[in-house]
Each structure stands twice: as structure tokens, then as C-alpha cells.
Image (cartoon, coloured by chain):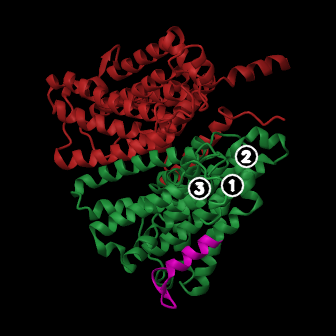
Amino acid sequence: MAETATIPRPRREGRIRKLLERYPFLPALVIVAALLALNGFFSPASLSYRALTGLLSTYMALILLSIAQTYVVYAGDIDLSAGAILSLVNVAIIVLMERWGGGAGAVLLALAIGLLLGLACGLVNGLVVAALRLQAIVATFATSIFFTGLALYILPVAGTPAPAIFWRTYGGRLFGVPFVFYVLAALIVLITVMSRTRLVTQLLAVGDDQQAAYQSGLPVIPVRIKGYVLCGLFSALAAFCITGDTASGDPLVGGKMTLYSVAAVVLGGSALSGGWGTVVGSLLGALTIGLINSVVFFMGTPSEWQNFVQGLAILVVLMAGVLAGRRARP
Amino acid sequence: MSQVVSRFLSFIRQPIIAALVLIVLLLYLGQMLSPGFASGGQILRLLIVASLLGIIAAGQNVVILGGREGIDLSVGGVVSLSAIIAGNVMNGADSGILPAIAACLAAGGFFGLLNGLGVTLLRIPPLVMTLGMLGVLQGLLVVIRMGIPSGQAAPALSRFVTQPLAFGIPGIIWLWIAIGVLMALMLNRTVFGHRIYAIGSNEHAAYMAGVPVRLIRIALFMLSGMFAAIAGLCLLGYSGTSFANVGEQYMLPSIIAVVFGGTSLAGGKGGYTGTMAGAVLLVILQSILTTINIDESGRQMVFGATLLLLMMFYGRGRAMRA
């Protein structure tokens, strides 16, 4: 911090505030670091390379789903069907890969169709919420029922295995480095590029003040639709990760993940009312949920108390996320 | 002539009228699909289920009316918790009913209080606060379940919910009607009710006019917890014994019932009478889908699509204007 020495020394609180304004995901980062330290304290082995790889490959799907959720939250919307889209894409690619023989070509083709499916689901949500002006919470709940029905139609019961080439790649290594790290690196590049696009700025503008955005000539409805489409695409990516991790199809796998994705967005300091937030924060928020679960396990909490302690810890960090996020807002 | 038509259209677009018309149409459709669907006994069974949903939706309704993105996602957890508390306190004995009611109301009120404190003092958005509370409640349910059995409903409670009480109508439906009347009186005739609308439509103006905004909002969340607790108690009477996460399936439907009843999620506008019609509509719709012979996947797709279609009919937002 050499350059700060030359300017008048700001008040301590002002400096923290500035830092928060510049890097709004800092509180989430501190929480993640603290949880990592706690994990290491209770079980040093949980900080090993292998354990962290396992944590990342398990929670990569939630990370992606939380990022998906972030883009709609930017615009002040919410998507309660993100988990259902994940389930739908999961069963669709599993069934397609199996039907086409499970070779490399089949896998790639199935993934492409999975992305298209995610896009289509996002488009449906966008049309229903933005174009038809239905209330986002109830409308996306209705579409989630529809998507779940579709997933059940494609694969009525959980179980069809993924082709070996798919989960071996996801769980394996490339040039000696676990594959999930490549996924993480690609994801960071992707969200950095995304954050510089006009669309993200437009989403934030719509979320900040929809009326003002409309009056200054922003195409509010198309922007919100694009937000949902983006959410659908990232939910499809999340589905790829869960398919790699569980190596099978399950029409209900994403149902419980939707509310966790909303929680991760809040943990990351983004405002649910829209107009303010970071995708990196949501990534850290999803990791926080994963780390809380593992800390509670490694602390030696009696098994019947684990869910309660997890719930309590998540409630506390949710509050912390909201309070810190509010402080950081300019 | 066209004036008559347009007047008729605006009449029918009132949420409660629309819901009632749809209820009649759905009953007719159900009767066509499977004769006996609209028989008296069957309608009573539908109303019992609707009253469970409707009582939860009463709490949801007041929280939503109170505005500031008011919503209560923890109701599902409170319903489950209340069912298990009631089952253990009464443990199959009629003498345990009164203590069970007291215990359930206290638990529901307590978690509602926590929600209300978080929303008002810490200014946590209701969606976040109640979502976090739902996680805590679900964890608490696991703790309770590992330690003690799920408990039994007292015979009198089961009779109250499932057997006719007066004029051939079960007690729970009378209870729901009473709640409906009390809610209408509270919302329209009491200072408290007017203040709910006041903070829901313009919180700042209400504050300036001397309305104790925080106290009222806390009271709304407590009411929501207590209504969910009553529903949990009745649910125990309905099923005889409580099972894991029995309340979760009511969480989002309770919001949909409120929306179908014409209450705006933005707060300050709506009432409970419409919500009651919305709850009946939702239950009839689900019931028709179980009577027609399609598999689960088709049922869910039709249900989701129908919900969207109904929302398009009413409950749409206003178009943007420059």
C-alpha cells in the first residue's frame, strides 16, 4: 500500500469501507478463510490436496448454480426453478449419452443438447416473468413443477449410470492436475469476461431501478429475459458437474439445491432486491455452505445435531452477508 | 351491448370472482372426468385439505400484506415442528390437547418472533431471514426425531379434523370459516388491520403518521408462525401421526394461494377472503390431477402449466410506462 502513504490518511472506517466497495466479496472471502482454518484445526487431513479436490468436485455444481442465480438476482428477479433445470439437464444428458453408445462424440453431442435445453428453460422463465409480467417467485415455482415433470418423463426413477468416459474425465486428472481445477480456472475466466459485458451492466441497471432503466431507453424486458437465459445456461453447466460427480441420473437431484443457491448469493453479499452484487461472492458463498457442512462434520458434532448446527451456522453467516453487503454498498 | 360485456369482463377479472368461477368449472370438469368427484362427501374431503393449506396461507397473507417484500418461507418448518410437538405432548390422550395447543402456539410464536426481530432490528430481507430459519427448523426436526418417537394424535383431535361436528361439517372447516371471519374483521375493522395495509403500501408514510412499524411487522411474523402451528396441529389430527417434513409441501403453495386470491406480493393490497378461494382452487386442481389416469410426470407438467395459465388470468404486474 505504498501509494496510500502520500494521500491524506483516511479514517479507519473509511478505508475499510473503500476496500469493501472495491472488493465487495471480501467478507465472504474472510468467512471462507476462517472456515478453512477451522477445518484444518479440527482435522488437518481435511486441508490436504486430495480433500480439497474432493470438496471442489462435490460443490462445483452448487457453485455454478449459485452463479446462475446471481445473474437473475442482479436484475432484481429470482429463479426458483434453477434446481429443476439442473435435474432436467442431468437426466436428459444421461439418457442421450446412454442411447448414443457412450462414446466421446456421443458425450459431446449430449452436452451440447444439454446446454440448449438449459437455454430453452431459461427462455421460458424469462418470457413468463418478464414478458408476461408474472411474479417471479410464484411463476418460477410453477415452471419448476413443469420442468420436474419433464425430468420424470425422461427418467422416471434415479439410477441410469453415466458412461465411464464422462465421470472418469470429471473425477480424473489431466497432465497431473485434477480436472475440477481446470473447470474452476475456466469458470473464473468465464465470469471475468462476463462481468465486462454490456449485458451484466444492463442487468444491474434494471435491478437498481427498473423504471429509471426503462426511461433511459434500456430494453428492460429483453434484458431480463437474457438474465434468465444466462441462468438456464449456467444451470446446465451445473448439471454437467453434478452428472460428473454422481455419475448417474436423478430426476429430483436439484430440487434441494435451489434454496441453497439463493442462500449462496446472499452469503456472497449480493442484494436480493437487485442492482448490486458480485458473481465471485456467490462462488465463495457456495463454498461457504460446503465448508460449513464439513466443519460441522469434522468438529465431531453428534450426527443428530449436524443438520441443526449447519442450519444455525448458515443463518448466522446469511445475516453477516446481508449486513456486510449493506455496509459495502456505495 | 359491448358495455355489458366489458362490465362482465371486469367483474370476472376480480380475483375472488375469478377463483370462484374457476372452482365451479373445475368441479364440473372433475365430475365429467370421474363421476362422484363433485359429490358432497368428496367436496368435504377437499375442503378439509384446503383448510389446512388455507390456515397456513392466513399467516402468509398477513406477512405479505405488510410489505417490504414480506414472505415467510419458514412456515413449512413450523408446520412440521408443531405436528411433532403436538404428537408428543398429547401422545394419544384427549387430556393432552389443551397443553399441546399451548405448546404449539408458543413454538410457532417463538420462531415467528425470531423472524420478526431479524427482519426489523437487523433489517434482514424476509426471504433471507425465513429461508435461514427454515434450515434451522429442519435441523431441529432431525434432533427431535432422533430423540423421541413421532407421537400420536388424540382421538378427539382426529374426530375434530375428519368427522362431522355440526350440520355434517367437520370441525376444522368450521375453524377455517371462523378464522376467515376473524381475519376479515381484523383487516377491515380494527386499527391493527388498517396499520397492516398502511405499512404495506407506504412504510415511511406510516412511520411518519406514528404507526409503530417494527412492532406491527414483528406481530405479523408471530401471527404467521402461530397460524402455521395451528395447521401443524390439525395436520397431525388429519394423518394420525406425524412424519418427516410433513409441512414442507405447503410452503410454496401457501404463497400461490395468496397470489391466486388477489393479494399483491408487493404488499398493501388484497385480503384473506380471496386467499381462501385461492386455497380451495389449488386443492381442487391437485385433486383433479390425481383422479385422471396419467403418470406422475404428466401430472406435474399439467399442474405447472395450469398454474402458469391461472396466473396469467390474474396476478399479472403492470406494464412499464415511460
Q: Which residues are magenta?
A: A170-189
Residue B127 spot, x, y in % from top left: 50, 40
What's the chain of the residue with tag 3?
Answer: A
Residue B26 spot, x, y in % from top left: 56, 33
The disc label shown at residue A19, or none: 3
Callout 3, which amino acid? Leu
The disc label shown at residue A227, or none: 1
Depth check, front residue: A274 or B239 = A274
Colour green maps to chain: A
Instruction: Work out whether A315 lies above or below A88.
Output: above
Of helix, strand and loop, which mostly describes the magenta segment?
Answer: helix
Q: Is residue A254 left or right of residue A195?
A: left
Disc 2 target residue:
A206
Depth check, front residue: A298 or B143 = A298
Residue B56 spot, x, y in % from top left: 42, 30
Depth check, front residue: A214 or B87 = A214
From the image, state the color of chain B: red
Q: Can see residue B295? A: no
